[in-house]
Image (cartoon, grey):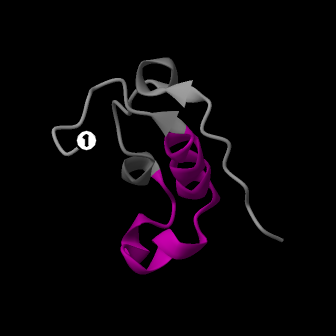
Amino acid sequence: MENIIKRDKFDFEIGYLTKSPCLTCDKKSSLPKCHDGCLILDEIQTKLARGISSQRSSYES
């Protein structure tokens, strides 16, 4: 199933992480191998991918 990401939120609406979820994870001894199958990291990455930067990039014309 294809994940479609709708980019409809600005970065200030999403927020930011204050602590890595890996610090308290039961599987942290398996780092970094466990990150591919981590549902929490997947959800965080999906939410961040929805964000539109509120800062203008210096690369834009």
Residue at the extreme top = 13
Residue drawn where x is 60% and y is 72% of the image = 37
Residue drawn where x is 43% and y is 27% of the image = 11
Q: Is residue 42 above or below residue 24?
A: below
Q: Which residue is mark 1?
A: 60
- Our reading of the magenta stretch's main secondary structure is helix
Other residues around mark 1 within 10 Å, as few (<14) / some (14–19) / many (≥20): few
Q: Is residue 7 above or below residue 55?
A: below
33 or 7, nearer to the observer = 7
Report if residue 28 lies within the magenta region: yes
Q: Is residue 55 above or below residue 29?
A: above
Three-letter code, disc 1: Glu
Residue drawn where x is 24% and y is 40% of the image = 61
Q: Position of residue 13 (x, y in %)?
A: 50, 19
Find numbered disc 1 in the image and state the secondary structure of the residue it sits on: loop
Q: Is residue 58 above or below residue 43?
A: above
Q: Position of residue 39 (x, y in %)?
A: 64, 59
Quarter of the picture holding the N terminus? bottom right
Q: Position of residue 55 (x, y in %)?
A: 28, 26
Report if residue 4 lies within the magenta region: no
Based on the displayed image, in which of its 4 quarters is residue 7 positioned?
Answer: top right
Residue drawn where x is 34% and y is 36% of the image = 19
59 or 37, nearer to the observer = 59
Residue at the extreme bottom = 33
Q: Which residues are magenta?
A: 25-50
Q: Position of residue 5 (x, y in %)?
A: 66, 49
